[in-house]
Image (cartoon, rainbow, N blue to C red):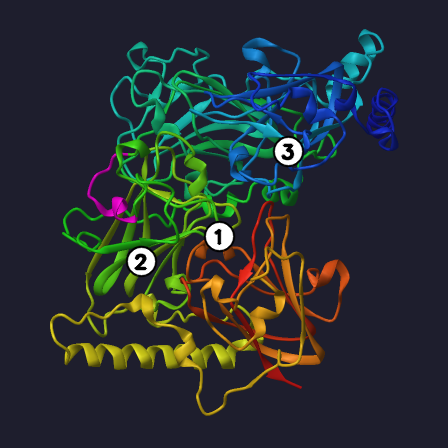
Amino acid sequence: MKDVIILSLLGILGMGRCSKDELVNVALRGKAAQSSTSYGGTAKRAIDGIWNPTYEYLSCSHTSGETSPWWRVDLLETYQVTSVTITNRDTLAERINGAEIRIGNSLENDGNSNPRCALISSIPAGGSTTFQCHGMQGQYVNVFLRGYMQYLTLCEVEVNAHPAPIEMGPTQASELNLIVPVTDNVALKKTTRQSSQYSHMGGSNNAVDGRRLSMYKDKSCSRTKSQVNPWWRVDLQRAYNVTSITVTNIEDVDPEMIDGAEIHIGNSLQNNGNNNPLCAVISSYPAWEVMTFQCSGIEGRYVNVFLPGCNKHLSLCEVEVNVGSRPGEEQTLYDMDEHLSSDMRVQDMKRGQDILCPDHKTRYENAATGGIANQSSQWDMFGDANNAIDLSWSNWYLEGSCSHTKAEVDPWWRVDLSKTHNVTYVTITNRGDCCSDRISGAEIHVGDSLFNNGNSNPLCARIPYIPAGQSRTFPCGGISGRYVNILLPGKEKYLTLCEVEVQASTFQAGLPSTAHKTAVTAPNRNLAWLWDLLISLGRTAIRKEETYNQNSTEEETFDHDKISFETQRPVDKVPENLVSGGIEVHSSQYDSHGAASNATDRKRNPLYHAGSCSHTEAETNPWWRVDLLDTYQVTFVTITNRGDCCLHKINGAEIRIGNSLENNGTNNPLCAVISEMREGQPMDIPCNMEGHYVTIVLPGREKYLALCEVEVYGGK
């Protein structure tokens, strides 16, 4: 009988919904508004039905630089929102990182206090990403970007939705609520625990007393002592499908400390419950604000708030847990795989049991002090690489204590420690005045090689997130190395570091180190033989050069940056340069000096006016191509960069090899992306690919492509 009732109720529920085929983009008929308008980017452009990501084509909204900008669409009636799709602009793509999608029926705080559907960790430049909202109901959809001096640009917002279910009288409405009940706060007055207690006023039960008082002196906030990885937990007494969690932050005692806290939900008490599935990460949280995090029906009896890091204290003034029905009463709304894939930081953020904090009883050398820093580029006069090792922890960029690169492909920063050390851990201080999310995804590498500017050395750690103006310590386990690199993979990325501390001891041969177990690996497994040979020759060259330096005069110095793999190619087995007799073309020609054939004239002259370099006009996605006249196995490609100016213009260029002329050959398989080249210097790039055409394409708008020599080595 019970089964019959449930089936009947499900049938009633289905009557109130449109069919799946009727799911439409309801934003197209809505009315858009935003917090401000700049550069002509009106709010309605984001719902014009055009997916063009280039701002100059007048199809993207744009706010002024301001505190916490927002954009909103009024759908004119309440809908059940299945998903929201956002198209990002093709430049300055990182600006959208950290934006929130909020859905509801309230215009309080311009709609930005409505329940949250998703947190946007990133959207690729010019790409579109869909965020699942699981039928959240609302008339207003907001995109809200917290922070100081932020710009919000949206090139298209699509809201895929059904009309909200129509209630069919008191009886049906009551029966529907048996399936998806709207519950009160189930955490209220439940049993709580925390990792420690700061004082008699900071008991864990204060966070579920039903009061949103935000002053610690009011005895309504929990608070732990300063410790490693503090946590708080509520036992709901039984398992629920948790739809959302609302947290009230403290106002009077370090409100920024909550940045980076994680909300976990589940049925396990392993690691005090902190290993349960992740609902959300709390970031950029203002004092006393009440914020709601959507959890999409995660099942669990325990709700944890977990703050990873060293010397942290966790304060919570109220935690409210809103739930759906008990597990088993309905088909679950929660898809674990979908939930985890929606936020790429999930796996990286689960570091609770791996965090290593400084042992203050042991004095380690900050090996970066007195070191020499370099970076891939410099933004302006304030952003020198050495600012990151000046022993000043100022996190405001204009105070001149932070390094800063330009927007580029795979920006990097490096410190030369002058000799090999065993690196125990690396501490990084993030920028505090804006743009704190930019560092997410950066990698720390430690080793003795300068191949690929040191970015191919063994990996110490990946940085998932550092709150604005705060420091995080990453364990390296004693990896041995002279160079410490911070690499930020991706296109159009800025890398800013306000302090880098390298805690290490002078290298001891035989000291256990992960460096001895970790090898620099080839980017292509088919290239292992060539990669090993190049690395071996590179190390031999370094050892020979260092031996020479030990016997040289004091005035002579060894510049590791001058090592080039051009000199490390086996001299007894020089392969054939396949471009001889080939046919060269490019997308355009800048002037009479820049013919495509200049790039294969067997001259490595890097001076443009010497007539030995190709050069396109400024255009979108310029390219150069050589037809080898037959299909060959290409072992590696050597490119000589321009030496008289503009050396960074080649950054981000792609080498593609294959047999197709579709899209002028730029759709062929990718050999490599050129992250950076030295001025006027050749670079060998291993490929081990088969093809008739070798194409070099530089993605982006208003780009020039100049090549002073292209050599293609291989055979049949």
Which residue shows up at 63% across the image and 54% down it? 622
State how far apart marks 3 and 2 are (Cα): 40 Å
Q: Amino acid at mark 2?
A: Val
x and y percentages locating residue 665 in the rendered image: 71, 63
The first of marks 3 and 2 along the sequence is: 3
Q: Which residue is mark 3?
A: 56
Toward the bottom, the furthest residue is 572
Q: Which residue is mark 2?
A: 484
SS at mark 2 in the image: strand
The first of marks 2 and 1 along the sequence is: 2
State how far apart marks 3 and 1 are (Cα): 27 Å
SS at mark 1 in the image: loop
The first of marks 3 and 1 along the sequence is: 3
Q: Which residue is mark 1?
A: 489
Q: How many marks?
A: 3
Which residue shows up at 45% across the image and 37% down it? 437
**Magenta range:** 385-394
x and y percentages locating residue 614 in the rendered image: 57, 63
Other-residue count near label 2 (Cα within 10 Å), few / some / many at <14 / 14–19 / ≥20: many
Toward the top, the furthest residue is 170
Res 396 seen here: no
x and y percentages locating residue 445 in the rendered image: 37, 59
Res 211 seen here: yes
Toward the front, the furthest residue is 592
Tell me whether the residue at label 2 lies in contact with that at label 1, contact meaning CB atoms closer than 8 angstroms. Answer: no
State how far apart marks 2 and 1 are (Cα): 16 Å
